[in-house]
Image (cartoon, coloured by chain):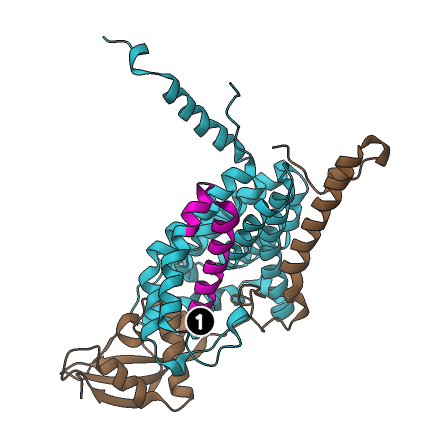
Amino acid sequence: MTAPAVPTRTDVVRVLVAGYVALWTTIRATDLLDTLDFAPRRLDPVGPLAFLDGPLPAVVVVLAVIVTPIAAALMAVGRVPRISGPVAAAGFLLITTYRNSWGQLHHTENLVALHLIVLALVPFVRRRDTTWAMQAMAVLTVGTYFLAGVAKLRISGWAWLDGDVLRHQIAFDNARKEVMGDPQAPLGGWILRQGWLLAPSAVMTMVVELGAPLALVSRRLAALWCGLVVAFHLSIVAFMAILFPYHLLGIGLAPLLPVERLGATVSGWTRRSRTVSPTSRPTG
Amino acid sequence: MKWVGIGNRFRPRRWRSYAAEVHLSFTRLAVLSAAVVVLSPLLRPPTSDTYPLSTYPMFAGDRGAVHSMATAVAIEPDGSASRLSPELIAGTGEVVLASVTVTRAVRRGESAALCAEIAERVEPGRIIEIRTEEIDVVALVADGAPPLSFVTEARCRGGRE
């Protein structure tokens, strides 16, 4: 009898990412289907769908919304990986691109789509060691934050650090919510009244974003950076009511962290519960 | 899994087996490919955003304090205006999408068409206005200040024609 395989980091990350996608596409299904009722004049196709000159046929959208969570769930549990992975990745890319093609570019699903593509490639690479996938995903995670920091420098220069740009961004985002009949962020008004906090907040934002590549240097720096990222996203929720669930839940950060320990713990529990047969339990 | 940082890859070649060499080359290729893909938006202007390879320009520029914001409101019997939800304005729960929808309609001269769309989603007889409001966003959010001024772009009555 062979010992059960201990889950690798790739296994755990696959369960987390594909499980997240299955849940996200199920919860957001009605939002995704809302696009069927949008006036065609509102279509503004982007990315892989930039070639579109009219809305997609309804059957394609409905099929993608139905098939993607199923494929992602199969991918999460490791079933038919050579089919479920590519279908989940392509389906997710299709529905999120289509959702972004109506005038608003969301920035919450970009990393999910890229991570899913890497994970979908894993079964096609004939290697037992999947370190390459985790390293590629870690680079994608770090790269997105680094790009966000670089964008601030390219657009506003070092003036971004004085806190005024951040003040106006927080105010604009909350004002737009107010004008559109939506509640403001819980601490949006408060942070604007505490003017002295804005410059240090801007500096911390840049430290997290431009310092992201340091997370690739060592395990300790990776853990430190991931902690800062979670705090950063919590503050975005508090001040702007913008939720990046994939990042905030730590799933986007998982390739950088020793999540295989989590997998080993869970599989240990499973093994123990299997070995404790009804006859071996104390009858009391 | 052993943590494999970028840094500890640079060990003397003689210490490694051929298989390990091949694996390292593949891993390096994967990492390099990921870096090229995710950083490729640097080749575009920073405000040229797309999906999924974004330049992440969303919080990068200084928006200033005073803004023209297009929105839709309901006019109450006493003449006051009340805010409509994103669902009523654009048929979506997403605030930014609703805001973009009204802004585009105003810019393209389609305010009347959007007003008619909203009218179908509200109770009959309710008066709807598409407006462009001049707002000091810092004063509004920090102190609840009202809009500085507004222009009515279109006006219609709720209920299907």
Q: Is residue A215 above or below residue B109?
A: above
Per the rendered image, the range of residues in magenta is: A71-99
**Which residue does the image show at 51% across and 72% down from the upper left?**
A49
Colour chain A appears in: cyan
**Where does residue B105 sit, x and y in percent of width and height?**
38, 85
Dominant secondary-structure state across the stretch colored magenta: helix
Q: Amino acid at mark 1?
A: Gln
Q: Is residue B137 visible?
A: yes
**Which residue does the image show at 43% across and 51% down from the upper left?**
A71
Marker count (numbered): 1
Query: Front-most of A31 and A238?
Result: A31
**Where does residue B37 sit, x and y in percent of width and height?**
64, 59
Query: Front-most of A70 and A23?
Result: A70
In the picture, measured across the screen, residue B36 lies left or right of residue A35, that is: right
Q: Quadrant of the C terminus of chain B?
A: bottom left
**Which residue does the image show at 82% across and 31% down from the upper left?**
B15
Q: Quadrant of the N terminus of chain B?
A: top right
Colour chain B appears in: brown
Query: Front-most of B69 and A136?
Result: A136
